[in-house]
Amino acid sequence: MTNIHTVWSTGRPLSCILLVAVFQAISGQIRYSIPEELQKGSFVGEITKDLGIDLKQLSRGAVQIITEGKIQYFALNFQNGHLYINERVDREEICRRLLTCLIKLEILVQEQLKIYTAEIEIEDINDNAPAFQVEMLQLNIPESSTTGSRFLLPDAQDPDLGVNSLQSYQINPNRHFSLDVQMTASGTKYAELVLKESMDREEEAFHDLILTASDGGIPVKSATVHIKVIVEDANDNVPVFSQSVYKVTVEENLPIDSLLITINATDLDEGINSEITYTFRQISEKASKIFQLDSKTGEVILRQPMDFEQCTVYEMEVQARDGRGLSGRANILLAVTDVNDNTPEIAVTSLTNVVSEDSPVGIAIALVKVVDRDSGEDGEVICSILGNPPFHLQKTFDNYYSLILNKALDREETSDYNVTITATDKGTPPLSTIAIIPLKILDKNDNPPAFKEKSYISSVSENTPAGTSIIKLKANDPDWEENSRIIYSIIEGKMNGSLLSSFLSINSETGVVYALCSFDYEQIQKFHFWVKAQDGGSPPLSSNVSVTLFILDQNDNAPQILYPSPPTDGSTGIELAPRSSEPGYLVTKVVAVDADSGQNAWLSYQLTKATEPGLFTLGLHTGEIRTARFLLEKDVLKQSLVVLVKDNGQPTLSASVTVTVLLADSIPDILTDLSSISAPIDPPSDLTFYLVVAVAFVSCIFLTFLLVLLAIKVYRWRSSQLCHNGSVNLSGVPVSQFVGIDGVRAFLQSYCHEVSLTSGSRRSQILFPIGSCTNTLTSQQAPSKPDPLLVTGDSNNFKEDASDSQLNYGQVHYSIPEEVQKGSFVGNIAEDLGLSSQELSASRFRIISEGMLQYFILNFKNGHLYVSEKIDRDELCGWEEKCILSLEILVEDIVRIFTVEIEITDINDNAPTFAQERLELRISETANVGTHFPLQEAQDADSGNNSLQNYHLSSSKYFSLKLQRRSDRDEYPELVLVKSLDREEEAVHFLILTATDGGHPVKSGTVQICIVVLDANDNAPVFSQPAYQVSILESVPIGYLLVTVNATDGDEGINAEVIYSFLKIKEKTAQPFQINSRSGEITTTGKLDYEEITLHEIDVQAKDNGGLSDRAKVLIKVIDINDNIPKITVTTIFNSISEGSSLGTVVALLNIQDRDMGENGEVICSIPTTLPFHLQKSFDDYYHLVTDRLLDREDVQNYSITITATDKGSPPLSASAMLFLEISDVNDNAPIFRIDGVRAFLQSYCHEVSLTSGSRRSQIFFPIGSCTNTLTPQQAPRKPDPLLITGDSNNCKEDTAVNEVKQSVEYEESALYGIEIPGTNVR
């Protein structure tokens, strides 16, 4: 495809050129120089004169100015031959950074067939001031940056060249920074900011600088950029507390979550370096649970209640630590004021919890200790007893009170007392507490049993089985336990000649009277006996009561018929009734009796069977048998009547008899019939047998029950007698040396108590009510193994000593070292308290102090106090100067209290220890020499000289150890920096801190200190090479990795993170490239074109997060490939050529270019060899198309010429252009006239023209030689001819004569017009 350059023509368009001569192109060249930015129309040069072109020729001929590009910067005045500026010329826009800016013009003079080349050099003027890409630049520079550190500044851009370009940089004067201008290998200047004096952010946090870039033009032009230097903080300031000691006083009843105090530390640094974290540096374990320190706000919050009585002052050391490890410390002294928040405490040490009701007035019942842990009036206590019990409190000494009996006791009135002791302090408001002492009154047998009734009357039914409960007697004894245990018995007597005990028995415990046999009312109607109630006291007391027992009748006897008496021979009784008897005649009377009494003996008679029913009647209660009607002849002689006799008992018992009544008028008749009457015989019954067997079986069971019950009673009675009469034998029991009693049983004479003691008990007390006691055990009760219970006290002294006692007080002091072995001797308490061994063994000793018993044990045999458990002074007393354990020993029998103080002295049994085995400190490498770093303190549980005394640090050239002293004279270690650190030189330091005490031998503890040097941004990134060169083909795809730049930073962490960016890059260069800010990879983002830019020069910057940077240059050389096809430009072409043209005639002027380089840009041009033309190279890239054979229009009227341009690349690329050439005719053939259709007749030539019907503006062109415009007379039309012949016969130079149709042509009117145009050939 052909690309035609823009052509300006000064002549009229040529339709046909008759070439009459063969010519050769002649070239010429001239050069002008003009400054840029001239106004439009400015004179450039007199080009016609300089090129030797005649103005007349210029005005007659056609001239073309051929330039590349769309903008035509110059125009030729054809009147005077001057070259003028046609458009604004901007050198920077046209040539950018090229040193020489040339615009080439090709001037073609067609008439002369000459091409002239004009070069116009555009000179630079100072029309551009330097410019920065940003108006303001912010630089973040750490205050720890060392002197001499460099910071890259932005480059100014000045498109001008030479002296007009950027020449210098300046910065406003300041004491911290200077400017250093460097030059790259390509000659580009860039500026670096150099730190000449160390900065202090706390002194000046910002620096405002003005960077000025100036060129060398006249006048000088400049640009400025505002550089704001922000001084980044380095951790060079330790947190400082507002006070070295914070003192606060609070009440102990402050509620939970209350704010106690807010500590505040300030750090002049900023950011993470000023972020302060508060922690407790030294605090006791107990205080750490009570107080909480907010790590962010410094607020000390109460988390658990405080107790003035446990601790009055809390001393805590707090630490403020910034984000980089520097710290400050302060002390908090928190004083707790007392409030009346403790109720009095009542500790009751009972001498006995039982009191005999016959105890004398004035006896001490209990020992009471009243303590109020508050101080002042809040701790003063008033004690009293609620109610009006027979006791009162008597103060003995200090806080001890005795509970004294002030009137006689009567257990029967009040068996026990809950003595309520109230202790009230004098605080505001007053607090009080109560303690209840339960006292049981021991009974004396001073009351006999008493029955509820003076006499008892009871009844029992007869026939009651043996063992039936008859009556329960109840006697009451107001005494207690054994004294109130009642035994019932029946006083022996006789009844009907038999002993009363054969009829009755009584349960000795319940008083229930039982029948020993079945009673028969018919034999005995009542019993009268006495019952005795005897208690279990000693001596026993008893009382009697009269008991009357009535036997109640039971229906146990059936009626007995006396008449008629039952016959012994089985016959029935016979009665006579004359036939003449009237109704109501008494025939006979049935007589019956019942052995029972009462209604059980009420009898009724009933006729149950009769031979002639209705003949006789029977009296219900009389038993009289009478006739009920007159006797008839038909009545049977022998009448049998069955009479049933019933009693009125429950159940009803009965008897029956059969009465035979004979009806006869005379006695002989009766006698005759008597021999034939016989009584029926009833079969015998088995009921009686079974009843007898059942009664015998029940009686046997009852007797067995009575025997078993009697055996149990006898066993219990013997057991009680054994306990009652037994004694305790101490002679066979090994004497124990220990107070503690575990898992034993104690048996005393009067009472038998089973006591369970917990295993391991050492404070258990066993209290026994004591009467008159002995100290021997019966042989069968002797223990099989040594008894751990040591029974102390004399049975004869219990009452007397207690009644006459007065409370005494004593004190003794001992001192022992800690960690002594178990069983070590402490002191002889008996001797030191003035007690003999006899008094010691006879008295009842008790250690009543709480919590101390497990450490010491008392041997009652020799009065020595021994160590029973390991004693650790540090565990008991911590760091208290004196460690004293107090024991209170109560001698109950002589009512004396002794205080034993045992001082525990310290031994060097603990080495100093650190809370951690390894301590890590993070110190910035910018830390100033002399900076202090607090170290972890060692702890030594010992006290005095045995405690922590000194610290030592392993050798180091960077650090030393300094001991600081607090107000309490404690020393703590601090690490002091004596030499600046360099992380890049040594990143980690290891030290050993040793803490030693003052004991013999000396003990020590160590902690390893690991010092991690934190990085400061003191190293700028450094590229691995100052310049990176790479050559690539221009055909590389988008995304292709060209080169990877690499810069390293000696710092670490965020300071070593390098960000890559293009620092300076031309606009065209920036388009096809990008750089990965993290990896430094430079890749393509667009297509490369060698023909546009062969070398890309890029400045790359590597910048760390601290603002330090380095720069490098990247040179990307583009290698040409054959990617451009040749371009054929037809500069001049003659559309027609005469067929008579000579050989070598120029047909066209061609410009053939290939933008590639080397062989890729070398072009071979050709046309088909069959054509009568060939290409002839003129100069540079210009070719002439010339004829090489004669042309004959009659053979070929036109030619299509294909021009092919092929480069020498691999693979070769080619382009083609098509030229169309018309062969113009010359008069080398005689005229031949042809008449077809519509014809026009010419004299010299005959042209046949076809006109469309209706045409009005059609033009007919005729070649004109010597022409006329007249028609021959014979051809004149009859009406006006629509053809107007125009053209001047005298003007034979015109190419054509134009015959214009002036009138519409109608075919129907005239199909043929004849026009005669005379003409001659011009030779």
Image (cartoon, rainbow, N blue to C red):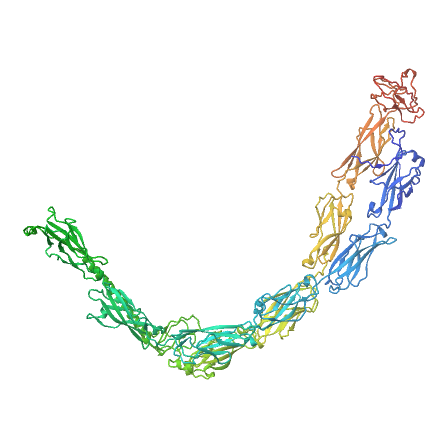
**Relative to 838, is 1318 on the left or the right?**
right
Seen as rendered, the residue at the extreme top is 1274
Q: Residue furthest front?
A: 582
State the count of labels. Answer: 0
Q: Is residue 571 visible?
A: no
**Can the viewer see residue 666 in this picture?**
yes
- Residue 274 percent coordinates (x, y): 68, 63
**Is 1023 left or right of 101, judged from the image as shown?**
left
Q: Is residue 468 left or right of residue 1118?
A: left
Q: Position of residue 186 (x, y in %)?
A: 80, 52
Q: State the quadrant of the C terminus.
A: top right
Q: How far across and how far down the image is residue 145, in percent?
A: 73, 62
Q: Quadrant of the N terminus?
A: top right
Please tell me in which quadrant of the rendered image residue 908 appears.
bottom right
Snapshot quadrant of residue 1094: top right
Q: Is residue 1172 above or below residue 208?
A: above
Query: Taking 1083 as reference, is 594 above or below it?
Result: below
Q: Nearer the viewer, residue 246 or 1139?
A: 246
Front in this rendered view, residue 566 or 1215: 566
Residue 640 is left or right of residue 1074, and the answer is left
The quadrant where residue 235 appears: bottom right
How far across and down, in percent of the image, does residue 897 sit? 47, 80
- Nearer to the camera, 572 or 1292: 572
